[in-house]
Image: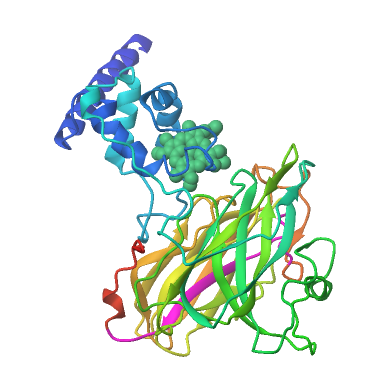
Amino acid sequence: MKKFSVIIFLFASVILMVYTSCHQKKKGLPDKIKFSENIAPIIYKNCMPCHRPNEPGPFPLITYDDVAKRAKMIAYVTGKKIMPPWPADPTYSHFAGERYLTDDEITMIKMWADSGAPMGDPKLLPAPPIFPSNSQFGKPDLVLKMPSAYHIKGDNKDHFIVFKIPYEMAKDTFIRFIEFVPDNRKYLHHMNAHLIQYKPGAKKDVFSDEEYVDQDAFDTRVIHEKLGLANDDGSYPLLTPSVANYLPGVTPALYPEGIGGYRMAKQGVIYINNMHYGPAPVNDSDRSYFNIFFYNKPPVRPVMEFQMGTLGISPVVPPLSVPPNTIKKFHTEARMPQDISILTVNPHMHLLGKSFLAYAIKPDGDTIHLVRINNWDFRWQYFYTFKTPVKIPKGTLIYAEGVYDNTTNNPNNPFTPPQTVAEREGSMRTTDEMFQLIVTYMPYKPGDENIRMDSTYIKN
Ligand code: HEC
C-alpha cells in the first residue's frame, strides 16, 4: 500500500514536471536562460536603481559576478516577491513607475539560478544604464543645501530632526519642481519638506537662529521659536505643504508641464519636518540638498493635498487603539464635495500595520480601485502616482481600511510582550500608531483622464 502511494506520487510528480516544462515553453520562455540576454535587462531595470553604490540596497547588483554569486538568494527573494519592494498589489491597481516582476520574469530568474547561472554570450550583454548622480531630472536652476553637515549619532536610535534651509534670491519666481537629493542614503529613512515664504519686509534675516532641532526634545511651538520661523512681528508666514518627500528607492513624481508648481518668494525657507534617520551603530553625517527647477510662468493647476484618518479630514473609526494580542481593523471615510482628479495616494501606518485597502464608491454605486497592500511593510511607503489622473465625481465616498497585528506573530511588533499601541496626538514616533491615506489632487477638468503621469525628464 505504502509502495503504491509512493509510485503514484512519483508518477504525479513526473506529470507535473512535464506539464510545467510544456507550460513554460507554451508561454514562449527560452529553453536556456542566460544572463547576457535574459537576466541582465531584468536586473538593470528592477534592481540596480537601489543596488548600486550610495543607494539603499546592501550590495551592488550590476555585473555578472554581482548577480551570479547571489543567484539562489535572488531567485528566493524574487519568488517570494520580497524584491523589488513594491507593496501595492498589481492585480488591484496600476501606477506610474511601478516596479514588480512578471510571473515570466520570476520563472526565468529561477530557471537561470537552477541551471547554474550561466553568463551566455558576453557580446550580447546590454550596457548597464547610467544613473545621474546629482539629479534624476537634469540641471537644476538653484541648489539649496543644508547649511552644514548634520552629525548622525551612532547610538542605534531613531532620530527625528527638524531642519530649515534658508534662501534669498534677487526676485520672486515660479518653480516647477523641487527634487530632494539625499546625501546619507544609508541612514536617511524619510523626509518631508514644506516651503515657507516671507512677504517683502516681513523678515529681516532668514539666516539667523538654529539650523535644526531634535523633534523629540521639544514641543512644536518651541521648535518654531528655535528655528526662528515666524515673521518679525510674531505672525506666521505662508506655508506651502509637502513640496518634496523622500523614501528609499522612490523616484519623485514629476508632473507633466502645466500641473503642479509653486510661486517662490525671493525670501524663504525650506522647512524639513521632519527628517528621520534610522538607527546608526557608528557616527556618520548627512548634508542633503534640494534641486530647484524654475518655471517661467505662474502655476496653472496647483496640486493640493488632503489626508484622511489621523490628523485628517475624517476620523479613524473606531479610535485607533490596538489591544495586545489582537488583530484589529479600522477605517475612515470621507465624501468629496467637488469633482476632483486624484494624482497620488500614500497609505501610512507604522509597525503594527498588516494590510491596507482604499477605494472610492461613486454616487451611482460604481467602485474605483485606489490601492491595496496585502502585506504591509513599514519600510516601503510610497506615494503611488496613478498612470492617468483618477476622476472622482462630487459626492463620491473615499473609503480606507487598515488592519493592525498586535500579536507576537508580527515580527515588527516593537513590544514583547505586546502592549496596547495607540494614536497619540498625531505622534509620528514609530512605536505609536497612525492610520492615514494622503491624497494629492487637482479640481477636475475635462480631459484629465488622458494626462500621462509618467515622470518626464527636464531637458536643459
Ligand atoms: C527600492 C530599492 C530596492 C530595489 C528596487 C531592490 N532592492 Fe533589494 N534590497 C533593498 C534594500 C534596502 C535591502 C536591504 C534589506 C531590506 O531592507 O529589506 C535589499 C535586500 C536585498 C537582498 C537581500 C535580502 C536579505 O534577506 O538579506 C537581495 C537578495 C535583494 N535585495 C535582491 C534584489 C533584487 C534581485 C532586486 C530586483 C529584482 C532588488 N533587490 C530590488 C532595496 C531594493
State the residue at coordinates (61%, 55%). Answer: 288
State the residue at coordinates (50%, 58%). Answer: 382
The image quadrant where one finds the N terminus is: top left
Quadrant for residue 27, please give it. Answer: top left
The percent coordinates of residue 223 (x first, y second) are 80, 70
Q: Is residue 220 left or right of residue 69?
A: right
Q: Is residue 433 magenta?
A: yes
State the residue at coordinates (43%, 33%). Answer: 61
Quadrant for residue 31, please give it. Answer: top left
Specify whether residue 323 is in view: no
Q: Is residue 402 left or right of residue 88?
A: right
The image quadrant where one finds the C terminus is: bottom left
State the residue at coordinates (51%, 37%). Answer: 53
Closest to the observer: 352 or 113? 113
Specify whether residue 127 is in view: yes
The percent coordinates of residue 189 (x first, y second) are 62, 51
Q: How many marks?
A: 0
Main secondary structure along the magenta-highlighted residues: loop
* Residue 151 against residue 459 in the figure, above or below: above
The percent coordinates of residue 436 (x first, y second) are 59, 68
**Looking at this rendering, what residue extends furthest in the front direction?**
170
Q: Is residue 364 magenta?
A: no
Which color scheme did the rendering employ for the protein?
Answer: rainbow
Q: Is residue 226 left or right of residue 316?
A: right
Closest to the observer: 156 or 318? 156
Closest to the observer: 246 or 75? 246
* Residue 160 against residue 313 in the figure, above or below: above
Span of residues in magenta: 427-446
The percent coordinates of residue 392 (x first, y second) are 39, 81
Closest to the observer: 33 or 131? 131
